[in-house]
Amino acid sequence: MADATHNRRPFVLLDPPSGDHFTRRAALREKEDAAAASFPSIDLILLSGSLRAAGFEPMFIDAQLDRMSWDELTDRLNVLRPAGVISLISSAHVESELAQLARVKSSVGDMKCYIVGTIILQQQPGAVRSLVEANPRLDGVVLNTAENNLVEQLTESSGDAVEPFNIARRVGSRVVVPTVQVRYGDSLKLPQPEHALFKDSRYSFPQSKRAPVTCTQFSFGCPFTCEFCIDNQQYRKMLYRDVDDMVEELVRIDRLGFREVYFKDLTFGLNASVTRAMLEKLASRRLKLRWLCTTRIDVAKPEMLALMRRAGCYGIEFGIEHAKESVRRRVDKNITEDRIRSVLTNCRKLDIETTAFIMLAFEDDTEQDVKDTITFANSIEADYVSFNLVNALPGTAYEARARREGFLREGSNDLSFAVSNIKHKYLAQERVAELYREAVRSFYLRPKNMLRRVLGIRSVFELRKLIRLGRASVLGV
């Protein structure tokens, strides 16, 4: 392996420009002028530590947030002369963004160019190979950002000595696409991410109370089998990071002046003993840092919620999905209405804000089913509701069933979940779109909710956030 201290050339982590202001991060709306949230990618955050360990000087450019054009990005990189770029890529704009990256690389010259493979792309090795073969200026695709594999690969001078591990890349005249490997067993140790690179007061979460914010991840994977989910495809078992490393990262985040962190775990706290050990150590540090996460109703036991609150948790996102228990069971959410209401009530008593994820318009939903779900979402008294139209995402079991049963609308896919790509048995597409708009407005423009939010404002930051949420509710539907 090459010396990890070699000249520390910059290596840029990039969220590239986008002509239509497509937001690659979670938001109520994909149009930047009405986005309710914008925060750095967890993939780039995780990769930042690996780049440092590989002997490079990691840098971060958020060209979307800076409204930077491709020409302006090219000028910036010509000044920096980085050893390489690792860029996010949009599933909706793969070809155009790769063409722009190729143009940038041609201008800069001696610079490696990698992209972070989307979850959808990661599930299609043939598509990965074709993509690299069709784009000769693309050096490779990072298939798994949770493994510290960049050290071995990016420090090799010849490019042929190390077989790619979780990175599809060119090796001589070949394109090697490895099967994504996960090192289950011992807890995962990662180089500490370089959170200072991502510190920007413009970032926030929809639920944010304070800034600045950042993201982290304690666990990887999901053993559940929700047929509409793409995120659970890579890790079919849970893999946890080392508890002490995780707590140390949170301490460093706090010392850097961050005030909120979002755990990007698919299901926070699924392994109760490991999570309890981390939370107890975190609580003992008495940090100013506050955090939020996503978990399941059936994981949120009273004692776990109390410990989460003591360790700094201020918000939890729950997948509620639908008003009908039979539909919830069908999508692997075996939770009763009583259990949902009990957990949300317990969170309110602990002063933990809640967000309910709701799915609208399955293929066999009637208009009344959708309206009942909207009514149900308003009745459970969550602090926030994220309404999402049902989509059959590429690579999911739901897409396979939709294609098999003939209700997939080919060539139509919206990863923002504001437009559906399925044919509905009882609903026209136009009516589905109208119901979606009605759902968002019914919650965020509900007088009771608006009054509660106004009375809860404690800072200029929260006021600005509330205005963004209002604009997203009115403009983004």
Image (tube, rainbow, N blue to C red):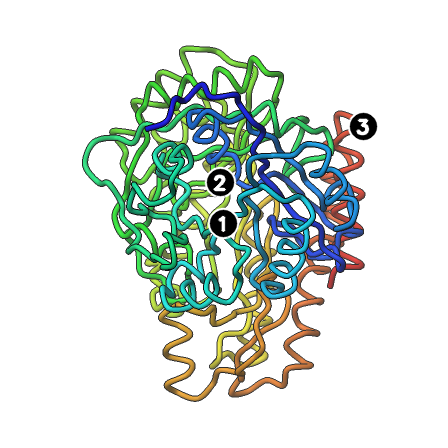
Badge 3: how crowded within 10 Å, few (<14), some, or many (20+)?
Answer: few
Examine the image and state in which quarter residue 460 appears.
top right
Q: CA distance from mark 1 to mark 2?
A: 40 Å
Query: x and y percent of residue 331 in the render?
Result: 37, 65
Q: Is residue 126 left or right of residue 445?
A: left
Examine the image and state in which quarter residue 376 appears.
bottom right
Considering the image in quadrants, where does the N terminus appear? Answer: top left
Q: Is residue 159 left or right of residue 104?
A: left
Name above or below for residue 104 compared with residue 308: below
Looking at the image, which is closer to me, 104 or 35? 104
Of mark 3 and mark 2, the one earlier in the sequence is 2
Q: Which residue is mark 1?
A: 116
Q: Are marks 1 and 2 in contact (CB under 8 Å)?
A: no
Q: Secondary structure at mark 1?
A: strand
What amino acid type is highlighted by mark number 2? Thr
Q: Which-is-in-front pick, marks 3 and 2?
A: 3
Q: Which-is-in-front pick, marks 3 and 1?
A: 1
Query: x and y percent of residue 359 in the render?
Result: 52, 64
Of mark 1 and mark 2, the one earlier in the sequence is 1
Name above or below for residue 364 compared with residue 86: below
Q: Which residue is mark 2?
A: 345
Of mark 3 and mark 1, the one earlier in the sequence is 1
What amino acid type is highlighted by mark number 3? Val
Name above or below for residue 74 compared with residue 212: below
Query: x and y percent of residue 96 in the render?
Result: 65, 64
Kindly identify the residue that appears in the image at 58 percent across and 77 percent down.
Answer: 412
Q: Which mark is residue 460?
A: 3
Name above or below for residue 305 compared with residue 403: above
